[in-house]
Image (spheres, rainbow, N blue to C red):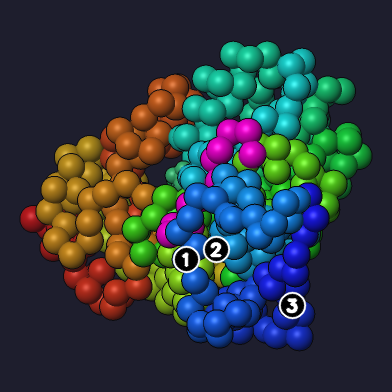
């Protein structure tokens, strides 16, 4: 089909702007036709052809929609990648990533992993003939030793969920590429505000857009960003065939969320530091897992690849009873799954996010009945601390 002039085709990557301005102005930012300052929600399934063999560049929303495209372009700009793809969830994004692997190939993953990612590789890809193994990715040499001749993908979360272990992005990128494997980083916890893995050698960045990118606990979404155009075809086929592209309304909500990403991440970071320091001194708290402590084993490594620590903290209480009390008695803080929103949320990994991870694996990591994960919101830090205090003492 011939194409007529597409007013949405050209966009500026805004390389002259700083990150805090890029999040506000996105790719096109305004609607190039009407001037609408808020990018329009193209709530349509299909697009009219003006004439025989004429297309505007948009044919059907499963393939592409201008609102989803604005989000994808914005994410490509922020992560400094060639292209991005927006999915209906982080899980759908991860499915599209792992579907790159063929039967008989091997995927090496970090040993502490989001529960849903563990479920994808164990219950779907391993069953379909992909070899799966795990290694602690703090040390790139350990990753090198765990590589196999058929390793085609290395997958890292840093910091990890929920143990806050740090993986060596630059070191692993080298090891993966020497073995001709793709290197994927789940950047959900840090976001491009703090950490840009594609600039340090990663080939793919994946996000649960549900978390900090959205930021308001009101949309489920996923994002993939690729470093080079070469992988474009793989992800376009995934979106076109599986139909897992994010809808226009949800895409718009994520675009809107991203506009305040910098402000929110700054506040999450500040609040988490204050809460982590307070938790550490509390007599009922046995251990605090927080990347921003100078004595955290990954502190230096994290600072060599990220400009902050994020808003996530995990901690172990003195007993399962204390954990139960805390979860039952928080008032402002909400006992709920998920993370990265404006509201502080406490989660109980053993029965929530990590329910499907085998018990011996969980216990080896330190996830037990006294273990809590908290996503620090953007409320006043003092209110978060006061709420934790009253819940622990009730
Ligand atoms: C939540 C999460 C996912 C899954 O994303 P959904 O949007 O819930 O499908 C993947 N990885 C990490 C690190 C997450 O926190």
Residue tagged 2: 67
Question: Can you name the residue that lies furthest to the left here?
Answer: 394
Where residue 40 appears, as percent x and y from the top left, is 49, 71
Q: Earlier in the sequence, mark 3 or mark 2?
A: 3
Residue 364 appears in the picture as rendered: yes
Q: Is residue 293 above or below residue 352?
A: below
Rendered-image quadrant of the C terminus? bottom left
Q: Residues within 10 Å of mark 2 (few under 14, many from 20)?
A: many
- Give the image location of residue 89, x and y in percent: 48, 45
Distance of mark 3 from mark 2, alpha carbons?
16 Å
Q: Is residue 79 visible?
A: no
Span shown in magenta: 240-250
Q: Which residue is mark 1?
A: 41
Task: Report the residue marked by disc 3.
Answer: 12
Q: Residue at x 57, y 45 (%)?
A: 62
Q: Which one is earlier in the sequence, the residue at label 2 or at label 1?
A: 1
Tell whether 27 sits left or right of 54. left
In front: 313, or 179?
179
Percent x, y of residue 320: 22, 38
SS class, disc 3:
loop
Which badge, 1 or 3, comes first in the chain's sequence?
3
Residue visible at 66% across and 60% down in the picture: 50
Q: Residue at x 51, y 83 (%)?
A: 37
Asked whether 253 or 47 is in front, the reply is: 47
Characterize the local packing of mark 1: few (<14), some (14-19) or many (20 or more) Cα atoms within 10 angstroms: some
Answer with left or right where residue 219 lies relative to residue 94: left
């Amino acid at each position: 089909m011939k194409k007529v002039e597409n007013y949405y085709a050209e966009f500026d990557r805004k390389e002259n702007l700083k990150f805090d301005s890029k999040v506000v102005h996105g790719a096109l930012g305004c609607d190039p036709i009407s001037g609408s300052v808020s990018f329009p929600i193209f709530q349509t399934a299909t697009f009219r052809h003006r004439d025989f063999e004429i297309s505007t560049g948009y044919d059907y929303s499963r393939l592409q929609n201008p609102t989803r495209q604005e989000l994808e372009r914005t994410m490509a700009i922020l992560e400094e990648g060639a292209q991005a793809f927006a999915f209906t969830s982080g899980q759908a994004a991860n499915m599209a990533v792992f579907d790159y692997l063929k039967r008989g190939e091997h995927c090496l993953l970090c040993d502490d992993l989001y529960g849903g990612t563990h479920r994808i590789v164990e219950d779907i890809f391993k069953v379909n003939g992909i070899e799966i193994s795990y290694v602690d990715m703090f040390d790139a040499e350990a990753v090198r030793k765990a590589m196999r001749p058929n390793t085609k993908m290395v997958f890292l979360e840093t910091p990890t969920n929920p143990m806050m272990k740090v993986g060596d992005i630059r070191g692993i990128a080298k090891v993966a590429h020497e073995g001709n494997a793709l290197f994927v980083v789940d950047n959900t916890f840090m976001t491009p505000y703090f950490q840009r893995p594609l600039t340090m050698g990663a080939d793919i960045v994946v996000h649960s857009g549900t978390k900090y990118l959205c930021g308001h606990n009101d949309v489920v979404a996923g994002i993939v960003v690729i470093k080079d155009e070469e992988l474009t075809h793989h992800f376009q086929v995934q979106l076109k065939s599986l139909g897992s592209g994010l809808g226009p309304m949800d895409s718009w909500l994520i675009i809107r969320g991203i506009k305040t990403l910098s402000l929110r991440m700054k506040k999450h970071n500040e609040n988490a530091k204050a809460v982590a320091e307070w938790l550490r001194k509390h007599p009922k708290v046995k251990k605090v897992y927080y990347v921003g402590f100078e004595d955290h084993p990954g502190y230096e490594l994290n600072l060599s690849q990220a400009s902050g620590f994020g808003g996530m903290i995990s901690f172990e209480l003195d007993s399962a009873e204390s954990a139960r009390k805390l979860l039952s008695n928080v008032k402002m803080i909400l006992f709920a799954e998920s993370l990265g929103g404006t509201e502080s949320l406490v989660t109980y990994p053993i029965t929530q996010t990590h329910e499907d991870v085998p018990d011996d694996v969980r216990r080896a990591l330190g996830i037990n009945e006294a273990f809590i994960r908290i996503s620090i919101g953007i409320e006043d830090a003092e209110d978060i601390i006061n709420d934790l205090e009253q819940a622990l003492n009730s």
